[in-house]
Image (spheres, helix red, strand yellow):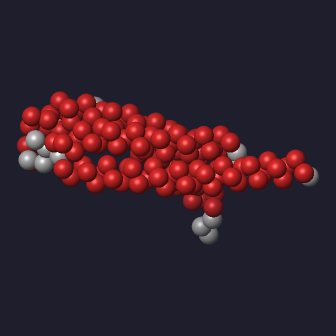
Amino acid sequence: MWNHDKSTTLTLICTRIAAAADFTALFFVPKIVDFFIYRGTVQAEGRMPVITSVYICLVIGGVILYMLDRLLNNIKHEDIFISRNVSYLRGISWACFALCVPCLVITIYCQTFFFILLASGFMGLILKVVKNVIEKAVLIKEENDYTV
C-alpha cells in the first residue's frame, strides 16, 4: 500500500539521483555545449559565456538539491512545521530566482533557455507562497505549544 512514508522516501531517492546527475554533469559541460553548438542550438560566439553560465546553474542546482534533501529528511523524521524548514524553503526560492540570472545570459545565445528562465522564476514565486504558508503554520504551532 502506498503511503506518506514511501512517497517521501521515493522523493528523497529521486532528489539524491538528481544531485548525483548534477555533480556528474559538471565534468561534461564543455562537451555538451559543443554538441549544442554543432547542432545549431547555441550560437558559436557564445561558447564561453554559455559554459560559464551552465556551471553557475549547476552549482545553484546543487544548492537547491541539498536544501531539498534536508527538507525532505526533516519531513521523513516528522519535523514538518519547524523554522528550519521555512529557512530551507526560503533558500530554495531565492536560489530559483538566482538561477534566472545565468539563464538570462544563456538565453542571449540559445533562445530555448528562455523557458527555463520563466520556469525558474515561476517556481521561485510558488515556493515563496508555500514558504509563507509554512511560516504562518510554524507560528500557529508555536503559539499552540505555549498555550497547552
In this view, the residue in front, 17 or 66, is 66
- Image coordinates of residue 13 in percent, x first then y, are 50, 49
- Image coordinates of residue 86 in percent, x first then y, are 62, 44
Q: Quadrant of residue 51?
A: top left
- Image coordinates of residue 70 in percent, x first then y, are 58, 41
In this picture, residue 134 sits left or right of residue 144: left
Residue at x-position 17% and y-position 30%: 48
In which quadrant of the rendered image does the N terminus lie? bottom right
In this view, the residue in front, 107 or 42, is 107
Q: Is residue 122 visible?
A: yes
In this picture, residue 132 sits left or right of residue 15: right
User: Most extreme residue toward the bottom, as rendered?
Assistant: 1
Q: Is residue 20 visible?
A: no
In this view, the residue in front, 65 or 21, is 65
In this picture, residue 140 sits left or right of residue 44: right
Residue at x-position 78% and y-position 52%: 141
Residue at x-position 47% and y-position 41%: 94
- Image coordinates of residue 44 in percent, x first then y, are 8, 37
In this picture, residue 64 sits left or right of residue 28: right
Q: Quadrant of residue 30?
A: top left
Number of labels in the image equals 0
Residue at x-position 41% and y-position 43%: 97
Q: Quadrant of residue 115?
A: bottom left
